[in-house]
């Protein structure tokens, strides 16, 4: 009897995903407003394990990724020297250093899967679905009601809600490649859940990821866009959606009002809702980014007093000397490390993805999923800073695009009929 141990390959990613509240709430509970101290220590452990992975499996890295890693390590070393020269400590402000150390998680996950191969995405998604649904049912059951929706009780934070995006893409891909009706129904369960959790940034990310994923699936040999499947994808949600909307309108008009408010917030992001809040934060810090556009403020940025004030009481949004908590990945990296800080994170992944897109031949459905996920992550970064687990999935993406794709089965060789191979015989009359 053989025991398949390939499920072990999902453990590194699950370890990184455990930094999200959907996982650690099972230990610390949902009443914790800020990230617990234990999770911060756990993240430092992940940094150490990532370094070990790099040391043991770094030789399996592609040359471009290895050079990128050397650049990141050099920047960490330079920041440590700057810290020692200015503060007399090698790591004076961990908040700033963590923005570079988190890249080590990406390299560690990448090196691990380059050595041992890609994990089973079905096992990873299965574990993820189990944790997300268990968390909702155990800790946030009250948020799954129409009254909670009307009162904007979200249950999940944006980073946790964003985990439903790869689940949604996986269900869609499995339906199109295997014709699994259960996966189609799961897809139509995930989409309402994403809407119900009311994170508009996740709505936009999903609206970008799904069409991009469908476009990439055109290169997947097993994906079939038959008339029946397309009708099921379009007609089923149209029928169920119209019935559901009708029932909601008749029984819960406040839910419709809440949806209208959400749509208006997205349409007028510069005037209302959280979009207006983000715009004010951007306006508060743009002068400092423009003052040091190339390499940013680095450790001095941590010492800079809080520049963003709460619109409701005109008080600093966060206490001084706790870091500047940006709701924008690009503003965060530009403030601390300038344009170089943004390029340090996104340039090589974009290059590798573009290289993969220009390669001829088929593409695995899982690779298409990860590329679509990365595409919407670039947009999601305009509303939120990237979480730790995003870098783990980014490492998986880099490993996936480096793997040779399965070749399409060649057509059978043409065999000439026997009569064509035999010389013609003239029969004398």
Image (cartoon, grey):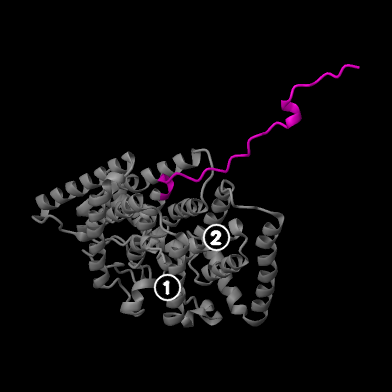
* Depth check, front residue: 258 or 160: 160
- Residue shown at 31%/67% (left/top)? 317
Q: Is residue 292 visible in this depiction of the protein?
A: no
Q: On the image, which quarter does residue 61 sit in?
A: top left
Q: How many angstroms separate mark 2 from mark 1 (CA)?
A: 33 Å
Q: Which residues are magenta?
A: 400-429
**Vertically, is 282 above or below 425?**
below
Which element type, helix, strand or loop, lies under badge 2?
A: helix
**Up/down of 382 relative to 32, above or below:** above
Q: Main secondary structure of the magenta part?
A: loop
Image-quadrant location for residue 313: bottom left
Q: Residues within 10 Å of mark 1 (few under 14, many from 20)?
A: some
**Looking at the rendering, in which quadrant would you find the N terminus?**
bottom left
Where, by quadrant of the figure, is residue 41 drawn?
bottom left
Q: Which residue is mark 2?
A: 267
The residue beneath circle 1 is 131
Asked if residue 110 lies left or right of residue 419, the reply is left
| Residue 274 placement (x, y as % from top left) | 44, 65
């Amino acid at each position: 009897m053989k025991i398949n141990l390939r499920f072990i390959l999902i453990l590194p990613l699950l370890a990184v995903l455990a930094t999200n509240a959907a996982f650690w709430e099972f230990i610390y509970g949902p009443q914790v407003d800020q990230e617990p101290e234990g999770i911060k220590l756990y993240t430092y452990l992940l940094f150490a394990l990532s370094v070990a992975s790099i040391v043991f499996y770094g030789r399996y890295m592609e040359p471009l990724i290895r050079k990128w890693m050397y650049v990141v390590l050099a920047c960490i070393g330079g920041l440590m020297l700057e810290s020692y020269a200015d503060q007399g400590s090698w790591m004076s402000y961990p908040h700033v250093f963590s923005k570079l150390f988190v890249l080590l998680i990406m390299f560690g996950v990448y090196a691990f899967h380059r050595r041992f191969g890609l994990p089973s995405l079905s096992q990873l998604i299965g574990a993820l679905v189990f944790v997300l649904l268990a968390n909702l049912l155990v800790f946030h059951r009250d948020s799954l009601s129409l009254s909670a929706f009307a009162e904007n009780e979200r249950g999940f934070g944006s980073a946790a809600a964003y985990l439903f995006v790869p689940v949604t893409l996986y269900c869609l891909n499995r339906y199109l490649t295997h014709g699994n009706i259960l996966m189609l129904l799961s897809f139509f369960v995930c989409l309402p859940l994403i809407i119900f959790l009311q994170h508009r940034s996740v709505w936009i990310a999903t609206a970008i990821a799904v069409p991009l994923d469908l476009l990439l699936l055109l290169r997947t040999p097993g994906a079939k866009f038959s008339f029946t499947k397309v009708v099921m994808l379009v007609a089923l949600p149209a029928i169920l959606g119209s019935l559901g909307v009708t029932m909601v309108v008749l029984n819960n008009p406040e839910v419709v009002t809440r949806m209208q408010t959400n749509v208006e917030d997205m349409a007028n992001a510069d005037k209302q809702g959280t979009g207006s809040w983000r715009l004010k934060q951007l306006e508060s810090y743009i002068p400092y980014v423009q003052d040091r556009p190339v390499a940013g403020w680095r450790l001095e940025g941590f010492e800079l007093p809080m520049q963003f004030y709460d619109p409701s009481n005109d008080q600093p949004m966060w206490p001084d000397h706790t870091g500047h908590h940006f709701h924008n990945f690009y503003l965060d990296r530009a403030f601390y490390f300038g344009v170089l800080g943004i390029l340090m994170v996104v340039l090589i992944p974009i290059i590798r993805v573009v290289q993969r897109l220009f390669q001829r031949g088929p593409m695995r459905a899982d690779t298409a999923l990860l590329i679509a996920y990365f595409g919407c992550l670039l947009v999601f970064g305009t509303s939120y800073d990237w979480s730790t687990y995003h870098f783990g999935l980014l490492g998986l993406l880099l490993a996936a695009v480096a793997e040779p794709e399965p070749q399409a089965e060649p057509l059978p060789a043409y065999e000439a009929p026997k009569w064509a191979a035999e010389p013609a015989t003239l029969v004398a009359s």
